[in-house]
Amino acid sequence: MDREHVRLAYGKEFVEFDVPRAFLAGPVLDTRKTGASPKPAAEEISEALSIPFARPKLREMAAGRCVGIVISDEFRAGLQKEIAEALVNEVLAGRPSDLRVFVATGSHDPAVYARNLKPHVEKLLAGLSVPAKQVLHDCDRSEFVGIGQTPGGTQVLVNKEWLGTDLRVYGHESKHHYMAGYSTVDKQIIPGLSSRRTIEKNHKNSLDHENAFAGRSPWHAVESRRFNPFAIDARDGRKLSERHWLSPDGRLVERAVDTFALDMVSEKDTIYWVRAGNPDLVTQEMTGVADKLGAYEVERTRYVVISPGGPPASQALYGVQNCFDMALKGAIEDGGEALVVAPCNGREDLPPEVRGLAPDGKSKALFWDNLVRFRDMPLEACASEIERAFELYLWKTDRVLKLLKANRIRMHLFCGLDAGLLESAGFRKAESIQAWVDERAARGDGKLRVINNGNKLFVTPVAAGG
């Protein structure tokens, strides 16, 4: 039988198998390599900063100012160090009065997700001729200032030290996001630099899984794709923060604060697109670029094999879940079967009962333990309980339950987790990718879609009549 050879990411390694060509619905879906720059990342970033979009050069804006630079944490792999270095050097060239570099950890533990960034930023700021400090955000322990409420009803409490800056610089990497539509600079404020209370209220919007999903954003050029309550609330929170400044004597002043953004779409050390300047205009342009690189419209199939990509996306089911919403849900028929290919080997510093399931004990308790608790409950009862007792991380439980119960997807995992453990939450373990594929090909009752880097793609079904 004529067969197609397939190679998918499996943690830091790869897995390979063959699929009968007649069984395949089409080529493997993966990130497109359009516009990849051969230049080193540092050079690409420097060039973007030299020709900002609808803003003066950052060094000119920084002169004599108290400047805040915010970078993302290490929850996702990226070029955070390169971004930090480029922005710090550019700001210093303008001779600011004060410099603060923030790591936007949101609800993540800064001891874990700023572990490598902390010494890197410390080195960047050592021995400078201007006052400079690093701020590792902590949603429970940092000092916050309330600045008002978004139209969506979120009370916005933002890191006090960020509000004390009068030039605010976002350093970010964008991609499709399974709740916010796209990861944007908005997320560096909510959740990035906000209190747990603010984050939880904003993130409860994710329970609207019909609108809060990948590819929908208020920044999108297509009007029909602009409604996303999660993303709208985050945008409004950032906008609200940019209208408030905390004076040196502690007075909260309502006034416009100058802003600047550096954003990019990248993969490992390769930059596909990078822009600097006006945060709103840069973000609007980004959505079209992200779609060009990672959006697909496909016919749904009965069977799907999907890899979320390499680490950290593949380390724990908590992160792997992103690809369920990003790519799997749009590619698979209701009642279909999926094989998820990810080692789920976890970080070595985690206890065995957490490793491979979640990034820490609390997220494991709320995400995984509730999947187990809700496994045999009717979906309406599950949804009602989650709505009533919503906390961070429960949105992931909600989305997996809807996939399993509402869409009736049978989920199999090729991973390092124990079969009995997986079954306790409604998953099944596959011991062999090849055997799983061959068994379903022999049934002759549907096609197979194969997806690589599912945490970076946005897959939707072909519209009716399309």
Image (cartoon, rainbow, N blue to C red):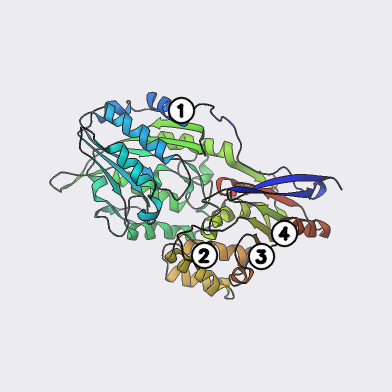
Q: CA distance from mark 4 to mark 2?
A: 27 Å
Residue 46, position in %: x, y? 40, 27
Residue at figure coordinates x 67%, y 55% from the top left: 332
Q: Are marks 1 and 3 in contact (CB under 8 Å)?
A: no
Q: CA distance from mark 1 to mark 4?
A: 42 Å
Q: CA distance from mark 2 to mark 3?
A: 19 Å
Residue at label 2?
Answer: 397
Q: Secondary structure at mark 3?
A: strand
Residue at figure coordinates x 37%, y 46% from the top left: 188
Q: CA distance from mark 2 to mark 1?
A: 39 Å
Question: Toward the viewer: 183 or 382?
Answer: 183
Return the residue found at the far front.
348
Residue at figure coordinates x 54%, y 27% from the top left: 38
Checking the image for residue 432, the label placed there is: 4
The kind of residue on which mark 4 rests is Ser
Q: In the visual, does 362 lie left or right of 11?
A: left
Q: Are marks 2 and 3 in contact (CB under 8 Å)?
A: no
Q: Identify the mark nearer the N-term, 4 or 2.
A: 2
